[in-house]
Image (cartoon, helix red, strand yellow):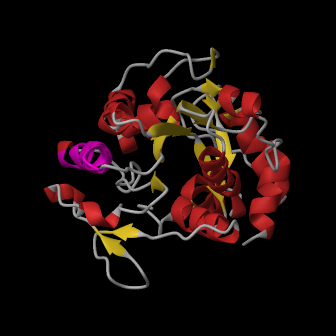
Amino acid sequence: MTGASGFIGSTARRVLTAAGHLVIPLARKGGAGGEASWDPENGLLDVGVLRGCDAVVHLAGHSAASQRRWDETHKARIRDSRVNGTRLLAETMARMAQPPSVFVCASATGFYGHRGDEWLDESSSSGKGFLAEVCREWEAAAQPARAAGVRVVHLRIGVVLGAGGGALAQMLPWFRWGLGGRLGDGRQWWSWVTVEDTAKIILFALQHPELSGPVNTVSPEPVTNAEFTRILADVLHRPAFLPAPAFLLRALYGEMADELLLTSARVRPAALTKSGYQFAHPPLKAALQACLQSR
């Protein structure tokens, strides 16, 4: 597993281990705590690291929200950390006489771009914009593994909610201080998922051979940003009356505002629903309460 120490990866490692799997973290500085090493930036991965593995779970990638404004260097890191690492893993598996049977690779609902109120499922076309382009390249980079007979699953992950990181961790301080509010007009759809469900969906994907290709990793109950704001404020028993105008967000964050904060993607988890996955907390209020109780 790559990204095993990250927000999603650490939870996924716990869930997979509890299910009886031996998880071997693949890290840039391997060697400690049973880790194996690789160097995706320089295309270095010993095929022996993957030999004998039943599956590869690839979650590593430079955070798209790790700095306030994107410059070309940061955008290149976002793209390269996803595309190059995926390609390296896929090409390494393709060279193996007996590759792992399944490759579960992170992607994102950014694949769909800004789509307003349109309902989107795995058959929907890709959208426009930087993140949509990155997601297309990210998913295409796994093709060598698919061509070699490996079952490839692309988890198109939405806004991930959890106590230890992600969007909720960035929002909580403002809302606790009573300074929360909608972003822009608040009409953009947020397709969210808890980090616990994300980890369990990774396990589910490993266990269900009918899942292949894109899998929308989102709750079946997306909400608008305005509704998200109202429910989070209600759960925290705080007011939320300070909206952030779109022009101010664009002035502060530039392109990232439109790509991450103001974009609208109303996504349904059609493949997971068809395969019988049961979400732990489908309604947002229950999910937020569970997240806050785990802090």
Quadrant containing the C terminus is bottom right
Q: Is there any visible trace of residue 239 in the rendered image?
A: no
Write the residue at 49% across / 22% down.
Answer: 114
The picture places residue 284, in percent across and down from the top left corner, at: 79, 44
Q: Magenta span has 281?
A: no
Q: Is there any visible trace of residue 265 in the rendered image?
A: yes
The picture places residue 76, in percent across and down from the top left corner, at: 21, 44
Q: Quadrant of residue 228?
A: top right
Dominant secondary-structure state across the stretch colored magenta: helix
Q: How many numbered discs sit on the rendered protein?
A: 0
Quadrant containing the N terminus is bottom left
Question: Outermost residue, left direction?
Answer: 42
Quick one: 182 or 128, which is closer to the camera?
128
Where is 39 relative to 255, above or below?
A: below
Write the residue at 61% across / 38% down.
Answer: 209
Write the residue at 76% across / 70% down.
Answer: 294
Quick one: 217 or 290, which is closer to the camera?
217
The picture places residue 93, in percent across and down from the top left corner, at: 32, 48
Q: Quadrant of residue 146?
A: top left
Quick one: 34 or 76, which is closer to the camera?
34
Residue 144 located left or right of residue 191: left
- What's the magenta region? 73-96
The picture places residue 160, in percent across and down from the top left corner, at: 60, 50
Where is 212 relative to 103, above or below?
A: above
Write the residue at 58% across / 26% down.
Answer: 265
Q: Magenta span has 75?
A: yes
